[in-house]
Image (tube, rainbow, N blue to C red):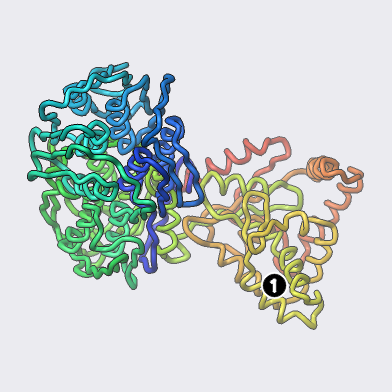
């Protein structure tokens, strides 16, 4: 997951490949709570690992449920047949509506001394209609802040089950879901009826709830969408084990990607057209806009069909979350797209109508909005506009409002016709439902190498370029290449393979070097996922590196290997010839210097800290001699690139050096 302050998406040109989706958030949190209300043990497979599910798991542990997590398999030992806790408990629910609403209802029906709080946005999300319904039932719930909103305190109820319980259906379907999941706890002796007041929105989410309740032994009688009856004698029964479908809402981004991007198409694993999730119907809307979609029992395949896409007008009540993706697809259409019946957007993680309108306008689009609708006018797309229409896509820094869906939707704007990058602020907000979303996107997206930014940091030995480069890479979420370590790793890998470091094995070493499975994480060097940092940093490791560095075929192979590190979303490369030889077209080149005296002092401290004896004067003389050799080499001598910015860090902290490089980079990456 990218935890950077922002993530710059380079201009993307196409996409092909396969994506395996995480589990459904809606199903995951429902299954966790239902399993907790059962007697005995339930094994949940393919559970979504995200912020929202972690919130629910933490709450279940507080209640006394047994919770064992092994990857995406979670074993829940339920509370059924056991005494619920009598002590006061405070729950932190983050911004997880799928955890807050059903848990509130279950706690209120069961009774106790419970407080439920969340992040500030959760305290702005209405819950009054659910509280009113629960109070009608005889539950004791107090507001601890603003009337109608969390935080809440739940106390012991005095249940009154002799009349139907009314609940509004036109604000959020989660209120009805919460009641349907909680009321079987009180239906042992008599049937309980729920009556929906007003039009029920997001009906497919109620279908999910009813489907899962049946899996747990609760056969709800449904009379249209207005009346639901939980039969007398209802009691939760564990299914023993249950599998969570992949998230159909998350599928929408890759369905849209297949419709937008040039390429051989996108295959989505984990969910198919027969999904119990209503958002799977997003594929019908995408097909209306021009996507070509085929499906099987657990997969979808999407290819670009009509281009440009077709503007549509659609009632989105059946796909409220996935419909947001249509708003970005609309930018690639042949005419305006209007999405209606989306009032629920206003009470989600943010006011999504306002958010989608504001961020689309940043990209240059014309947008109109109303209480429960939005109209997006397309921007020009290269395949059907003349040259004078180009340049209308605007560089934009997308504010994500701590809303995972805003971040994922607008990542699709990077495929724009004008081939300009897009900045996504706070990319870690996708952790709510799809922590590895951007990694999944980059695994199938492709673009010209010239579009993938590279920052080069060259400099003499012990100038601190490795530390500086790895820290800047971390701040930007870019890949990191420590080119100086490659010869050391190559020598180490060759010896491990039983080769000599002589000319006789030159071809074999070059073949090995060309596809060396090496990666850099901070200052760690990993070979085949094994940490070899200490092994290659030794004095012997340096001598071995010198032996292979004189082999021309090995040098050529390592040039190719270094080029392979230029991957989405970008690269930080440090060495001695990154800006002059390996990446001469890099948009930012930094030549890092420090006095020999300062570098010797740093190297001396480093060696002493590792338990090695060292003489600072000898170290300085060695560094000066090495500088002279490096600058006089016939092949790739150490020198600044002509367009490099020089940074003398003799008197600068590493933090100050990082800040300077970031300032230089930001000045070349201007977003509106």
Q: Can residue 461 be seen in this view?
A: yes
**Local SS, label 1:** helix
Whole-percent x and y of residue 104? 30, 29
Up-down relation of residue 183 to residue 209 (above or below): above
What residue is rendered at 88% in x and 50% in y?
621
Considering only vertical position in the picture, is 252 above or below 291? above
Judge by depth and name the residue closer to the eye, 147 or 413: 147
Number of callouts in the render? 1
Whether residue 417 is visible to the viewer of this picture, yes or no, is no
Q: Where is residue 343 in the image (x, y as percent from the top left)?
A: 16, 38
Q: In this view of the protein, which residue sits in the foreground, 222 or 649?
A: 222
- Give the residue at x 21% y 25%: 134
Q: Which of 512 and 548 is in front in this view?
A: 512
Tell me where residue 636 appears, x and y as whole percent.
70, 66
Q: Which quadrant holds residue 273?
A: bottom left
Q: In the figure, is residue 107 to the left or right of 60?
A: left
**Residue at coordinates 78% horizontally, 63% vertically from top-left?**
632
Rendering coords of residue 318 (x, y %): 16, 49
Dot 1 crowding, Cα within 10 Å, few <14, some 14–19, many 20+: some
Reading the image, the residue beneath label 1 is 555
Asked whether, in this view, residue 123 is left or right of residue 370, the answer is right
């Amino acid at each position: 997951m990218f935890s950077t302050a922002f993530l710059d998406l380079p201009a993307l040109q196409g996409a092909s490949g396969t994506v395996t989706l995480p589990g459904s958030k809606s199903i995951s949190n429902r299954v966790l709570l239902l399993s907790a209300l059962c007697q005995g043990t339930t094994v949940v497979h393919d559970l979504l690992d995200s912020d929202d599910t972690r919130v629910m798991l933490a709450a279940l542990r507080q209640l006394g449920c047994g919770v064992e997590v092994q990857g995406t398999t979670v074993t829940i030992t339920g509370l059924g047949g056991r005494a619920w806790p009598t002590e006061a408990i405070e729950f932190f629910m983050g911004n997880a509506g799928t955890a807050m609403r059903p848990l509130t209802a279950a706690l209120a029906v069961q009774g106790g001394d419970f407080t439920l709080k969340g992040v500030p946005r959760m305290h702005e999300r209405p819950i009054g209609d659910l509280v009113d319904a629960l109070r009608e039932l005889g539950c004791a719930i107090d507001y601890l802040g603003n009337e109608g909103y969390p935080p809440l305190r739940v106390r012991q109820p005095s249940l009154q089950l002799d009349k139907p319980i009314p609940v509004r259906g036109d604000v959020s379907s989660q209120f009805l879901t919460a009641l349907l999941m909680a009321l079987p706890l009180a239906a042992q002796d008599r049937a309980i009826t729920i009556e929906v007041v007003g039009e029920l929105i997001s009906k497919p989410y109620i279908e999910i709830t009813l489907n899962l309740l049946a899996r747990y032994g609760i056969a709800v009688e449904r009379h249209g969408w207005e009346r639901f009856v939980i039969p007398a004698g209802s009691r939760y029964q564990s299914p023993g084990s249950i599998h969570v479908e992949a998230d159909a809402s998350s599928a929408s981004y890759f369905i849209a990607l297949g419709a937008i991007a040039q390429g051989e198409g996108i295959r989505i694993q984990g969910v198919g057209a027969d999904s119990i999730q209503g958002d799977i119907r997003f594929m019908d809307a995408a097909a209306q806009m021009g996507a070509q979609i085929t499906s099987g029992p657990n997969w979808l395949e999407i290819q670009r069909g009509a281009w440009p896409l077709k503007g549509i007008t659609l009632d989105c009540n059946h796909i409220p979350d996935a419909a947001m993706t249509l708003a970005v697809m609309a930018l690639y259409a042949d005419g305006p797209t209007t999405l209606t019946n989306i009032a629920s957007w206003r009470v989600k993680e943010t006011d999504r109508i306002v958010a989608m309108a504001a961020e689309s306008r940043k990209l240059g689009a014309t947008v109109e909005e109303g209480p429960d609708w939005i109209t997006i006018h397309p921007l020009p797309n290269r395949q059907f506009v003349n040259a004078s229409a180009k340049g209308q896509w605007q560089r934009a820094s997308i504010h994500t409002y701590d809303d995972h869906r805003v971040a994922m939707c607008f990542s699709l704007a990077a495929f724009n016709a004008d081939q300009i990058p897009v900045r996504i602020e706070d990319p870690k907000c996708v952790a709510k439902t799809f922590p590895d979303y951007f990694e999944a996107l980059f695994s199938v997206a492709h673009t010209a190498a010239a579009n993938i930014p590279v920052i080069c940091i060259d400099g003499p030995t012990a100038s601190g370029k490795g530390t500086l480069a790895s820290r800047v890479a971390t701040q930007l979420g870019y890949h990191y290449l420590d080119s100086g370590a490659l010869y050391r790793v190559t020598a180490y890998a060759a010896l491990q393979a039983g080769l000599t470091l002589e000319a006789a094995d030159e071809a074999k070493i070059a073949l090995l070097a060309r596809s060396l499975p090496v990666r850099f994480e901070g200052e760690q060097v990993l070979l085949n996922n094994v940490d070899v940092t200490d092994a290659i940093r030794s004095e012997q490791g340096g001598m071995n590196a010198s032996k292979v560095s004189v082999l021309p075929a090995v040098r050529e192979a390592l040039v190719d290997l270094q080029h392979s590190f230029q991957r989405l979303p970008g690269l930080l490369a440090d060495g001695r010839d990154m800006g002059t030889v390996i990446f001469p077209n890099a948009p930012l080149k930094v030549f890092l210097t420090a006095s020999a005296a300062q570098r010797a002092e740093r190297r001396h401290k480093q060696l002493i800290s590792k338990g090695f004896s060292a003489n600072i004067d000898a170290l300085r003389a060695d560094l000066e001699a090495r500088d002279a050799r490096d600058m006089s080499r016939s092949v790739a001598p150490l020198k600044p690139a002509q367009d490099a910015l020089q940074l003398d860090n003799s008197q600068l902290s590493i933090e100050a050096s990082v800040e300077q490089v970031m300032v230089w980079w930001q000045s070349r990456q201007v977003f509106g």
